[in-house]
Amino acid sequence: MTATTGPTGATGPTGPVPATGPANDPGTLHERLTALAARQAALGEVPGVAPADPVNLPMIRHWAAALGDANPLYTDAEAAAAGVHGEIVAPPAMIQVWTMPGLDPDAGRAGTPVDPVLAMLDDEGHTGVVATNCEQTYHRYLRLGESPVPATRFTGITGPKRTALGEGYFVTWNVVWYAGGEAVAEMMFRVLKFRPATSPADPPSDGAPSREPYPLRPAVNDDTAFFWEGVAAGELRIQRCADCGTLRHPPGPVCPSCRSTARTYVEASGEGEVYSHVVHHHPPVPGRETPFVVAVVELPEGVRIVGNVVDCAPSRVGIGMPVRVTYRRMDDELILPMWTPREA
């Protein structure tokens, strides 16, 4: 799930929520954020608007197919009639789908008390965003024709915090969905809004000009260091259990087959096929130009690995597409493995 910023002015029970920014609030960013967060939290639960479309079978079918959920209570009228609900119901995990905005975040969406906080962080250079927590509770199933209405409560901000992505603030809010005045589901959502790292790296030893540091850096630890050392050497390394020989990816400290902590690695062929993929259009991602493709690539060695597909239009990427690994230098220090079409 992703969090999308919307209008900078929300409508609360006491009228418009001001879009507070650096131009009309004195003090440091932390002081202004703290004051704004207190005002937004004081608004309490702010109701949103009903979805453009009520709960409907075509959308349920698409969601169930995408997730591989074959429960007949969601799509088969005859089976659902004989089931505990007596009719088709929507998968509970779809709750956010019904009221999620499209690519235009302002279309058909009411402002929330969270928006001014996210806007202030954007204005101050904290343009990076990554979802960190999402906890949902379901009170009952939704039925065809119902229109759940979200209500949002801003609950807090924590920071500044130093992370591998950059310094930022954790922003938390709660959403409750109502149908017919009854709470049907609720969600706690938290994102990290961070300032992408921009400090200059040491110039490369060959005298070439330095590159702007790439803001999204992988976590390197005792479990993954061998993989990134291989990438730097132009090798695609897959972790292997030193006792039973099972290959695994992502790397980890313990073999899932025999529970051994002994490990080594093998060098993969660097070829594979697209197992699944998505084309990312929105929201913007620091260091990337949208749209771009993120794919799960199945290797002949028997594991799957996630990476971007490059050197072709997103519309050309499809399931089963043969690809080969390529290595792209993102800045003076970081190289990332990516995937490019493999010609027959």
Image: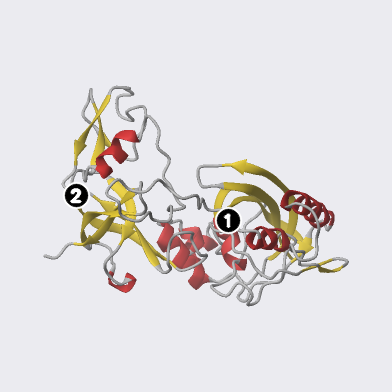
**Going 72% across and 63% down the picture, which residue do you hit?**
116
Q: CA distance from mark 1 to mark 2?
A: 40 Å
Report the amino acid beneath label 2.
Gly
- The answer to whether residue 133 is seen in the rendering is no
Residue positioned 51% across, 47% down in the render: 165
* Residue 216 in sight here: yes
Q: Identify the residue position indicated by label 2 in the image.
A: 270
Image quadrant of residue 150?
Answer: bottom right
* Residue 195 against residue 64 in the figure, above or below: above
Left or right of 318: which side holds 301? left
Which mark identifies residue 92? Answer: 1
Q: Position of residue 287 (x, y in %)?
A: 44, 59
**As rendered, which of 287 and 9 lies closer to the eye?**
287
Outermost residue on the right side: it is 14
Circle 1 Cα neighbour tier, 10 Å, few/some/many (<14 / 14–19 / ≥20): some
Q: Earlier in the sequence, mark 1 or mark 2?
A: 1
Residue 257 on image: x %, y %: 30, 29
Crowding around mark 2 (Cα neighbors within 10 Å: few <14, some 14 to 19, many 20+) is some
